């Protein structure tokens, strides 16, 4: 008798193959970007690309041993660079606004900004979106009205789209507050309108019970209590489960609900700004302001709790939230991280018994709204479409063409270097070859 290993599906191999091809395409895009910038950068700094390549290695593994990863000029090193641009979004914002102040930026800075954008291009799920929005909310809401009537014979009150937009984009409402406001304007109640309530929970980023929307008979026995949120860490797995259980029509309805949800998230990310980097810098500044308030409040009430929250490698404290701890001028990276919900619970628990004051009220209110200590890199970034990043890239290139004339030069195709960069950026499947 021969014993064989249990047969496996091709899903894992397919996943690895897709990931490998995605990496290959990214390398091709970056190789093209490096090629078009190389001549101008090498005139100024022949060692720049080697330092950039070596920056991912430990010191002993570097090809060239030097203390700086990016800039090693006399009078301008990495220290000055990070002072000028604490995050890559500060650099991108500066390049965006170069036409306002008339500044000309180092070609290496322009390259670094575009390189970052090539590595984070946004999603390609909707080719019809324009470059300044998350889609047409009017169409998404109209489809929701039609789906409710067609599938469930439910005719909810038609609401002026501006009212819905105000609720979904409000910075003063928590997810729960957003839900309550939507139920209120649609004249729905949680007790009488359970299906509609679960639908609007999903729209607001809360967990919704899908069997209550589509009926338990749409799900297998083990999934009769299935619930999910579009913001779950394992959303990619949940949506596959959902697709396997629901009819095509029902699944399309869920995807439309996600479009409404994503519109709301993107509106809050953009925070009224024209470009994503401008919004990210505002988030950075708010984080800085909130952190000062939080530290001050902890210091006033308990240095023991302050040390636990800011100076130690504890679970669900600030260092766990941001991924590093700073103490005595040293920064230590840590692997284990917590999400905002876990971190906020830890804060509220620590300050619960402390006397009420302006600082405490501010902290509790901002936590309730989900706007306290915003981070630049979150799972919400997944809702940002390629078109929004493309809009910023085009503006950066337009400004840079004024002082970097090579960006305006045309090749035999009749396209300028800037136009080729934008095309490469917005292609879903980048060609692995190009003309010189």
Image (cartoon, rainbow, N blue to C red):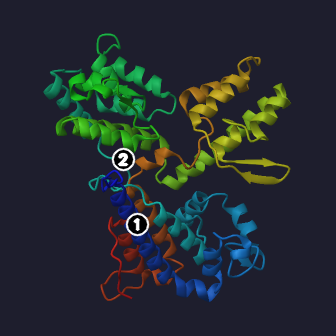
- Secondary element at image label 1: helix
x, y percentage for residue 42?
A: 60, 87
Residue 82, above or below 241: below
Furthest-top residue in this view: 191
Label 2, on which residue?
A: 134
Q: In this image, 364 relative to 356: left or right?
A: left
x, y percentage for residue 121?
A: 43, 60
Dot 2 or dot 1, earlier in sequence: 1
Residue 357, above or below 12: above
Residue 52, above or below 44: above
Q: Nearer the viewer, residue 72 or 158?
A: 72
- Secondary element at image label 2: loop
Q: In this image, 397 relative to 347: left or right?
A: left
Q: Nearer the viewer, residue 304 or 98?
A: 304
Snapshot quadrant of residue 200: top left
Q: CA distance from mark 2 to mark 1?
A: 29 Å
Q: Are marks 2 and 1 in contact (CB under 8 Å)?
A: no
Q: Residue at x 29, y 21 (%)?
A: 212
Point out the image quarter for the C terminus.
bottom left
Pointer 2: residues within 10 angstroms few (<14), some, or many (20+)? many
Label 1, on which residue?
A: 20
Q: Residue at x 47, y 82 (%)?
A: 36
Residue 386, above or below 270: below
Q: Nearer the viewer, residue 317 or 16?
A: 16
Q: Residue at x 31, y 84 (%)?
A: 414
Q: In this image, 277 relative to 419: left or right?
A: right
Q: Foreground mark, 2 or 1?
A: 1
Q: Which disc number belongs to residue 390? A: none
x, y percentage for residue 415?
A: 34, 81
Furthest-front residue in this view: 1
Pointer 1: residues within 10 angstroms few (<14), some, or many (20+)? few
């Amino acid at each position: 008798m021969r014993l064989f290993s249990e047969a496996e599906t091709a899903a894992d191999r397919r996943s690895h193959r897709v990931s490998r091809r995605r990496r290959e395409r990214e390398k091709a895009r970056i190789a093209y970007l490096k090629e078009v910038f190389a001549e101008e950068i090498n005139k100024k700094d022949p060692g720049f690309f080697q330092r950039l390549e070596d920056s991912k290695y430990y010191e002993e593994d570097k090809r060239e041993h030097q203390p700086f990863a990016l800039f090693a000029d006399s009078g301008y090193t990495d220290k000055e660079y990070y002072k000028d641009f604490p995050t890559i979004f500060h650099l991108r914002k500066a390049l965006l606004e170069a036409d306002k102040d008339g500044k000309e930026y180092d070609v290496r800075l322009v390259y670094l900004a575009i390189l970052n954008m090539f590595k984070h291009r946004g999603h390609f799920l909707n080719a019809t979106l324009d470059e300044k929005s998350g889609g047409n909310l009017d169409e998404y809401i109209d489809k929701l009205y039609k789906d409710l009537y067609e599938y469930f014979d439910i005719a909810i009150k038609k609401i002026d789209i501006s009212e819905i937009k105000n609720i979904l984009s409000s910075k003063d409402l928590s997810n729960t507050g957003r839900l309550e406001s939507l139920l209120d304007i649609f004249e729905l109640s949680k007790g009488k309108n359970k299906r509609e309530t679960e639908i609007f929970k999903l729209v607001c980023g809360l967990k919704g019970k899908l069997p209550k929307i589509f009926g338990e008979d749409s799900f297998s026995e083990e999934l009769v209590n299935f619930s999910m949120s579009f913001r779950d860490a394992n959303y990619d797995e949940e949506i596959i489960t959902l697709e396997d259980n629901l009819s095509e029509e029902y699944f399309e309805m869920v995807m439309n609900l996600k479009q409404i949800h994503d519109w709301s998230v993107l509106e809050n990310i953009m925070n009224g700004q024209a470009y994503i980097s401008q919004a990210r810098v505002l988030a950075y500044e708010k984080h800085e302001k909130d952190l000062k308030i939080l530290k001050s409040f902890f210091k006033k009430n308990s240095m023991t709790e302050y040390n636990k929250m800011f100076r130690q490698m504890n679970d669900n404290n600030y260092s766990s939230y941001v991924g590093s701890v700073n103490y005595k001028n040293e920064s230590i990276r840590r692997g284990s991280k917590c999400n905002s919900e876990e971190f906020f619970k830890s804060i509220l628990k620590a300050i619960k018994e402390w006397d009420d004051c302006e600082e405490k009220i501010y902290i509790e209110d901002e936590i309730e709204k989900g706007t306290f200590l915003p981070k630049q890199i979150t799972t919400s970034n997944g809702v940002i479409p390629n078109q929004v990043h493309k809009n910023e890239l085009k503006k950066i290139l337009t400004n840079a063409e004024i002082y970097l004339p090579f960006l305006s030069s045309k090749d035999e195709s009749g396209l300028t270097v800037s136009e080729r960069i934008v095309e490469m950026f917005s292609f879903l499947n980048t060609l692995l070859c190009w003309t010189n």
